[in-house]
């Protein structure tokens, strides 16, 4: 049998020591996942099974892979974005017996080839982020569907794609919508994205945010976090929306709300968080201020329309790591961060470990849940069962040393009754 070192494709195995240190650091800040690892070591829920993981390949993800491995699985991992893979982390995983097909900044063809190589291991279970595994399995590589029991999806964008497949009647196996669990979106999307987006922007630009105007495009859970933290940094925050209810919410949260064409004239920093394409496009570039800084935190690099920006430009150059300066034909300059890819992962390390602790605990539990129940679930997109969601919250509270109260019998009967008041 060949070793994981022989099977893997990584940039440089000699980077492993740095990767091990990064994984050790996050592990020390992921108490919920540590408890699940202990359970998995005892119960071996994935004994003899092959699991393919396609996630942003940084240290927290690496630790999740090791937890799944501790549960008895043979794990193969690949990256879910060309710029979010960290080569030292990949090298460390190979040394730890995980097969890795990933490197930082592959070209688009290589990127896809690496994902396909992972799928060619013929997994029993998958963990996906943004639906790349699922899309390939339902299109050009349907031959790899056989034997696949099911999986779990990490993100809003992936769930949109899964629901479209389900509606079409094309979905071939059960997928658990981890993104929609309370312990995911309330914390990861809001506090995780809120902090990591500003970490990415700040470490990349090293510019002040206080007193500037930040335009947050989209007020879903991620947008709420980005706007909240921009306010905390002292920015004047504008929110743009297409949904009237979310727009009222943004207004009541204290933000200016206006159409993008107005906001475009005022913004110093732009952060797109919509999951949709072309939310910043030609008509907006035409009115933006010189020096505007553009970034995206949505899954795909389609939110800031790059071809239209290129068409308006006479040239571009890299002025700092992860900052591309576009020189417009009319003399203005715009700065695009991380090629318009997720700024928090492509120009940072992703969400804080304590947040991914809950998200990845849900992933690990959901993988076990789908493996235990795939036959009865059928080819559907299902939510994480509430008991698992609550279990993650309880483990988290315990790790924080925070207790909560219990209803008394009188309180229970009061809540159950329509007569008592
Ligand atoms: N680290 C690993 N996966 C991530 C995700 N989906 N969002 C933020 N940070 C991450």
Image (tube, rainbow, N blue to C red):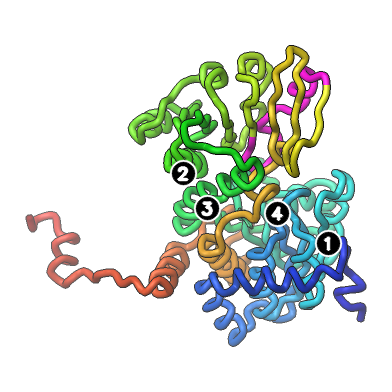
The image quadrant where one finds the C terminus is bottom left
Can you give x and y, in whole percent of width and height, for residue 32 in the image? 50, 72
Circle 3: element type: helix
Q: What residue sits right under mark 2 in the picture?
A: 229
Q: Earlier in the sequence, mark 1 or mark 4?
A: 1
Name the mark on residue 172.
4
Q: Is label 2 in contact with label 4 (beta carbons under 8 Å)?
A: no
Distance CA(mark 1)–CA(mark 3): 26 Å
Q: Residue at x 67, y 70 (%)?
A: 23
Name the mark on residue 192.
3
Q: Which of marks 2 and 1 is nearer the N terminus?
A: 1
Q: Which image quarter: residue 208? A: top right
Circle 4: element type: loop
Q: Which of marks 2 and 4 is nearer the N terminus?
A: 4
Distance CA(mark 3)–CA(mark 4): 32 Å
Label 1 packing within 10 angstroms: few (<14), some (14-19), many (20+): many
Distance CA(mark 1)–CA(mark 4): 24 Å
Q: Residue at x 77, y 72 (%)?
A: 92
Circle 2: element type: helix
Residue 107 in view here:
yes
Distance CA(mark 2)–CA(mark 4): 40 Å
Distance CA(mark 2)–CA(mark 3): 11 Å
Circle 1: element type: strand
Extent of the magenta region:
295-314
Label 2 packing within 10 angstroms: few (<14), some (14-19), many (20+): many
């Amino acid at each position: 049998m060949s070793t994981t070192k022989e099977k893997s494709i990584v940039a440089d195995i000699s980077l492993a020591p740095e990767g091990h240190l990064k994984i050790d650091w996050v592990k020390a800040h992921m108490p919920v996942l540590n408890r699940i690892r202990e359970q998995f070591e005892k119960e071996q829920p994935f004994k003899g099974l092959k699991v393919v993981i396609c996630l942003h390949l940084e240290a927290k993800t690496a630790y999740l892979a090791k937890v799944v491995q501790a549960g008895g699985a043979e794990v193969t991992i690949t990256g879910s974005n060309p710029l979010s893979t960290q080569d030292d982390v990949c090298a460390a995983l190979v040394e730890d017996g995980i097969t890795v097909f990933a490197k930082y900044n592959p070209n688009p063809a290589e990127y896809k080839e690496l994902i396909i190589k992972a799928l060619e291991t013929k997994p029993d279970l998958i963990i996906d982020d943004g639906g790349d595994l699922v899309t390939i399995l339902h299109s050009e590589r349907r031959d790899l569907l056989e034997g696949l029991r099911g999986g779990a999806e990490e993100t809003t964008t992936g769930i949109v794609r899964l629901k479209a497949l389900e509606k079409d009647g094309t979905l071939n196996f059960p997928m658990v919508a981890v993104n929609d669990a309370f312990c995911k979106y309330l914390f990861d999307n809001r506090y995780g994205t809120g902090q990591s987006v500003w970490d990415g922007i700040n470490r990349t630009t090293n510019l002040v945010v206080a007193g500037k105007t930040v335009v947050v495009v989209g007020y879903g859970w991620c947008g709420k976090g980005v706007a909240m933290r921009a306010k905390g940094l002292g920015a004047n925050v504008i929110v743009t929306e297409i949904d009237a209810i979310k727009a009222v919410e943004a207004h009541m949260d204290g933000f200016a709300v206006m159409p993008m064409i107005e906001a475009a004239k005022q913004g110093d920093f732009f952060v797109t968080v919509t999951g949709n394409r072309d939310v910043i496009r030609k008509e907006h570039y035409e009115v933006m201020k010189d020096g505007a800084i553009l970034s995206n935190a949505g899954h795909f690099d389609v939110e800031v329309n790059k071809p239209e920006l290129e068409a308006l430009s006479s040239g571009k150059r890299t002025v700092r790591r992860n900052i591309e300066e576009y020189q417009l034909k009319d003399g203005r300059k715009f700065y695009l961060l991380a090629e318009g890819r997720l700024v928090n992962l492509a120009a940072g390390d992703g969400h804080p470990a304590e947040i991914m602790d809950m998200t990845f605990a849900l992933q690990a539990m959901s993988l076990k849940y789908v493996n235990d129940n795939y036959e009865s679930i059928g080819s559907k997109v299902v939510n994480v069962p509430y008991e698992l969601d609550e279990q993650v919250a309880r483990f988290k509270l315990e790790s924080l040393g925070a207790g909560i109260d219990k209803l008394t019998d009188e309180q229970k009967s009061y809540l159950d009754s329509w007569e008592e008041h």
